[in-house]
Image (cartoon, coloured by chain):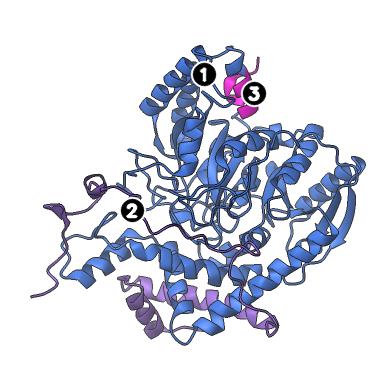
Chain colours: A purple, B blue
Amino acid sequence: MSLNRRDIENIARLARLALTEQEIPLYVEGLSRIMGLVGELDRADTSQVEPMAHPLPGQRQRLRADAVTETDHHQLYQQNAPQVEAALYLVPRVIE
Amino acid sequence: MSELHEKGVTELAAALRARQVSSVELTRALLERVTRHQSELNAFISISAEGALLEAAQADVRRSRSDAGPLTGVPIAHKDIFCTRGEKTTCGSRMLANFVAPYDATVVERLRAAGIVMLGKTNMDEFAMGSSNETSFFGPVKNPWDRARVPGGSSGGSAAAVAARLVPAATATDTGGSIRQPAALCGVTGLKPTYGRVSRYGLIAFASSLDQAGLITRSAADAALLLGAMAGFDERDSTSVELPVPDYGAALEQPLKGLKIGVLKEFFDTGLDPAIEQHIRAALDLLRSQGALIKDVSLPNLPLSVPTYYVVAPAECSSNLARFDGVRYGYRCYKPRDLLDLYQRSRGEGFGAEVKRRIMTGTYVLSAGYYDAFYLKAQRVRQLISNDFERAFHEVDVVIGPTTPTTAFELGAKTADPVTMYLNDIYTIGANLAGLPAISLPCGLAQGLPTAMQIIGPHFGEERLLNVAHRYQLETDWHRRAPPGFA
């Protein structure tokens, strides 16, 4: 299966990845090869089987009680933020 | 007494207990060794000299107060994918090059509570995506057996550090072979536990239906000792299983008489290095001489593991890595024009080539119109593979095959084509897809490079795997061989 330049540009836009001009042909080639590999799955007859939902048979995703368990750590967490002001995360202006 | 660096976890724990050495002396000796070999191997992303000596001093105080546990004062390293409070946790990425974790991963917390000393954080493929440690933002790790060759990946730093006798053991993670494959290429023991056995809280996520934390050690006995301290239920990880943790050391010596071993037919069919096959056949003969019964088993869908994985893993990666947006933490691009530019350039510049390739593959297979054809199809094949294993475990107790198709390859040999690199994990991915425990252990040398065999067991069958591996290691000395220059 082969992907073209437009496919890659479209995927990169969906994935919010800025690609350089030099990167695009590498991903055209790389993803085409990967999707060629994935094409081998067509060999398997899966008409009688459900998609696997969990690696452990019979396990269900556990849910916790809907209760407050965390305290406020914003000062600690915001030490890793690129830009903060008055305890708020700063981003470029969104609404003019 | 052999040199301190030559000892594994079990021996060091005994030396500490007998007060032949203090944790501070031991930690200082290993830190010196870690630092001395750093420029040559690049096995570490950060070395925690100050913190390690402080923890060692605390361990010695605990010992002097007779408050020490079996692991108190033993130094190890953590893969840099585990969050460590107050210290950098980079995941091998520019995206997190300056990230200081605000909390400890459960694995780190439990080992810390057991008195383990952390010497530093080991190098790895970026976000654990790679099979050669060449995708790390901090440069590749070199294989201690031959510095022109890769150590494997993604836990390449952990494997190289244990092989080079810089540390007795290191934590690692395995999504498609990232513990077992580097362990195989570096000649050390690598254990991937059952999905859900070890908490993943604080472990930076790659593919959540596959990721599992485990260990790289010098022996199965060492892995048993550490796994007992790491494993167990954690309410902070919703995939963590509520099952008691057995005493993994207790079953190690159990005789192998009557053990039913399946030889994975599909793993010997094509592409396997004849030297590796020969060593595994010899290992099977040894196990047979111990009373094990050997028979061939066939898992017809197993050859589809790699294509299945390269749909499921990228799909989950594209979703997990959506959190890196340049806003709350991580890399931010210079002077973004607007919000979209901020997202796109921060991600485009912060992630390396392989991570972007996987995010895009995942985005593609999940996109409208392709989801059924790729993602659901792969999850159906995954079920077939899982069913194959289940059928096999009705007939046999464990299955054995190779861990890798070849010994360690040269740096740069497989970077041009992603599919060539992906096929390295052809024997390891099956256990991840089915959530099974598996262990890789050295079983020979071919042209001076380690060869390895893999033992896969049923869900929560770690005790049996460790038992078989330990009995093998009692009869052989491959796991004791150090790379030339590192003895």
Relative to B216, say whether B3 is above or below.
Answer: above
Is there CB contact under 8 Å for labels 2 and 3? no
In space, the residues marked 3 and 1 are separated at their CA atoms by 20 Å
User: Residue tagged by mark 3?
Assistant: B11
Residue visible at 64% across and 23% down in the picture = B11
Q: Amino acid at mark 3?
A: Glu
Which x, y percent locates residue B477? 76, 33
| Nearer to the camera, A37 or B322 | B322
Residue range in magenta is B1-14
Mark nearer the viewer, 2 or 3: 2
Label 2 CA crowd tier, 10 Å (few <14, some 14–19, many 20+): few
Subunit that carries the residue with mark 3: B
Q: Can you tell which mark lies on residue A68?
A: 2
Quarter where residue A13 is shown = bottom left
Which residue sits at x=86%, y=47%? B259
Q: Is residue B43 visible?
A: no
Task: Give the residue number, with chain letter if any, for mark 1.
Answer: B67
Identify the residue shown where x is 17% and y is 63%. A91
Secondary-structure class at tag 2: loop
Under circle 3, the secondary element is helix
Instruction: Evaluate whether label 2 is on the same chain as label 1.
Output: no
Q: Mark on residue B51?
A: none
Q: CA distance from mark 2 to mark 3?
A: 45 Å
